[in-house]
Image (cartoon, rainbow, N blue to C red):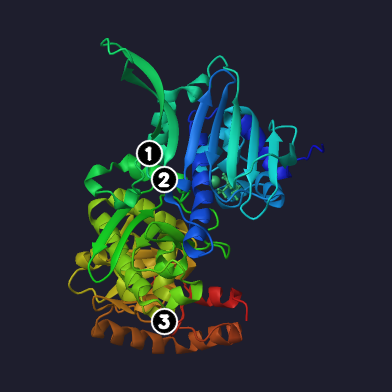
Amino acid sequence: MVQKEFKAESKRLLEMMVNSIYSQKEIFLRELISNASDAIDKMYYRALTDDTLAFNQEDFYIRVSADKESRTLTIADTGIGMTEEELERNLGTIAESGSLAFKKENEVEDGRDIIGQFGVGFYSAFMVADRVIVNTKSADSDQAFRWESNGVDGYTIEPGEKTEAGTTITIYMKENGEEDSYDQFLEENNLQSIIKKYSDFIRYPILMNVTVQKPAEEENGETEEVGEEQTINSMVPIWRKDKSELSDEDYTNFYHEKHYGFDQPLKHIHINVDGTIRYSSILFIPETTPFDFYSKEFEKGLELYSSGVLIMEKCPDLLPDYFSFVKGMVDSEDLSLNISREMLQHDRQLKMIAKNIKTKVKKELQTMLKNDRENYEKFFQAFGRQLKFGVYSDFGQNADDLKDLLLFHSSAEKKPVSLAEYVERMPEEQQYIYYASGESIDRIDKLPQTELVKDKGYELLYFTEEVDEFAIKMMREYEGKEFKSVSSGDLGLESEEEKKESEETASEHKEMFEKMQNILGSKVNGVRLSKRLKSHPVCLTAEGEVTIEMEKILAQMPE
Ligand code: ADP
Ligand code: MG
């Protein structure tokens, strides 16, 4: 039998698992049960959509059994199973989804963070096991296979014995260490509560042999202990449950179980709509920006279920781009199981659901801004840029939806403020919303152009991101107040009289300005007298719509 090496990344992750000091080792069970459930989903879906297959509800289950004698824990499912190639590909290389993130963060030395932050999938078994055996038979093959590994030395694959499609995973528990007890994962009661905690809503029964007290045979009033197979999970999907039954922890567990994210979600939104459209949905606003969020690789989307059956893992049509940070799922009875991706795009029901979701998310964010400022600022720090892109894209069509959600750093408050707050504070005579663009707040503060506005006692918004100025150009105004860059020609700070005075002074020094203009040549459009300066002798300003900062960005853009 040939011993095969794990791919480099898998090996690193595995070593981390083997040596893990992560305190919540119990999540390995969540990961294995979730894989089993995914595999049954695939089988279930087939049985539902393929008329040639018999469909029996009772054929779909997950069975967990512990044996203290041999120190083994077994998780068996009646799912789709794996072929030899699939075994090789799925368990020999690092899994795609959650663990992919690990690649970017692999500088982190301490496994604790990684396990907490990213879903580690199948390999998490090695936090508790020193040997794992996977017996599997694919529904598409007559031959079963047996995969075995002790984690460090690689793995072997050989033909196996299994006759029914599905997968059985056997875990050999590590010996108890000084601080760690692995025995706990063989204890019936403990296993039950771990399953309840993380996997309660799994749609298939999770069966376990449980010891129960029964009246003794002899009817002498005594009881005896007998083993009885029980379904441990409630099997009601969390989204079907009543909000009042659920705690924040339930939602967070669901978020982690589903690998929506590995942070603590900032907010969850639980929707149950029963009207012209019918759907349930649980949505999350994450706390931190996914590492690939602002890259081309990032795919937005929500999980889509049809009457509890997963039909698409990332349905992009449910979210506008500017809310692409939203994670979660939608379940609707009105969608057909067999609906294709193309058909979905044009599905009327789906469009209505998407519109509804958009409104709910927007409302939730507005409420958060109003009532939970601290968390909103955290949110905006992570995803505000996406909202600004939203204002800018589609020729400003979404500006109305998003304008109240924007925050900009303010000179008056020294913290991010909303446009509504800015306008509310404006003195009566102030005509414009003033802003200044630059690399950082510090740099902007040093701009001579900002002095006059601040001197007037007017509040100034700091635009430190490239998209800021483009976004507000799309909006043009907020509540009837136009935006004005401190670098633009006329700041609207002078009275008619002052303007006249300036013109006179300018013509008095006409010759000097002409001379300066000659020396600078085509580098500038003109040299003019300025009233905006206080402690600086000169400053650069732009004429027209495009400011100097925007020109810089435009110059960097590919043709
Ligand atoms: P993920 O579930 O995020 O894909 P995992 O590391 O948990 O990552 O699993 C890797 C892959 O191994 C799965 O995507 C699946 O293809 C396969 N797999 C794991 N467990 C099972 C199982 N019980 N039945 C069938 N396939 C499985
Ligand atoms: Mg998994």
The residue wearing badge 2 is 202
* Residue type at numbered disc 3: Phe
The reply to whether the C-beta atoms of the residues labelled 2 and 1 are less than 8 Å apart is: yes
Say whether disc 2 or disc 1 marks the residue closer to the N-terminus: 2
The verdict on label 2 being within 8 Å of ligand 2 is no
- Circle 2 Cα neighbour tier, 10 Å, few/some/many (<14 / 14–19 / ≥20): many
Quick one: 238 or 284, which is closer to the camera? 238
Gap between marks 3 and 2 measured at Cα: 44 Å
Is label 1 within 8 A of ligand 1 (CB to nearest ligand atom)? no
Q: Residue furthest front?
A: 218
Q: Residues within 10 Å of mark 1 (few under 14, many from 20)?
A: many
First in sequence: mark 1 vs mark 3: 1
Name which residue type carries label 1: Asn
Q: Provide the residue designation for mark 1.
A: 233
Q: Horizontal and vertical percent for residue 552? A: 55, 74
Residue named by callout 3: 395
Of the two numbered discs 1 and 3 in the rendering, the one whose residue sits closer to the viewer? 1
Pointer 3: residues within 10 angstroms few (<14), some, or many (20+)?
few
Q: Residue placed at 37% from the left, 69% from the top?
A: 435
x, y percent for residue 40? 51, 50
Residue 310 lies in quadrant: bottom left
Residue at 64% over, 38% down = 134
Q: CA distance from mark 1 to mark 3?
A: 50 Å
Residue at (24%, 66%) from the top-left corner? Answer: 420
Image x and y of residue 436, in percent: 40, 68
Compared with 306, 201 (above or below) is above
Secondary structure under the numbered disc 1 in the rendered image: loop
Q: Of the residues shown, which amino acid type is indicated by label 2?
A: Ile
3 vs 2, front mark: 2
Q: Nearer the viewer, residue 210 or 14?
A: 210
Q: Position of residue 159 (x, y in %)?
A: 74, 42
At mark 3, the secondary structure is: helix
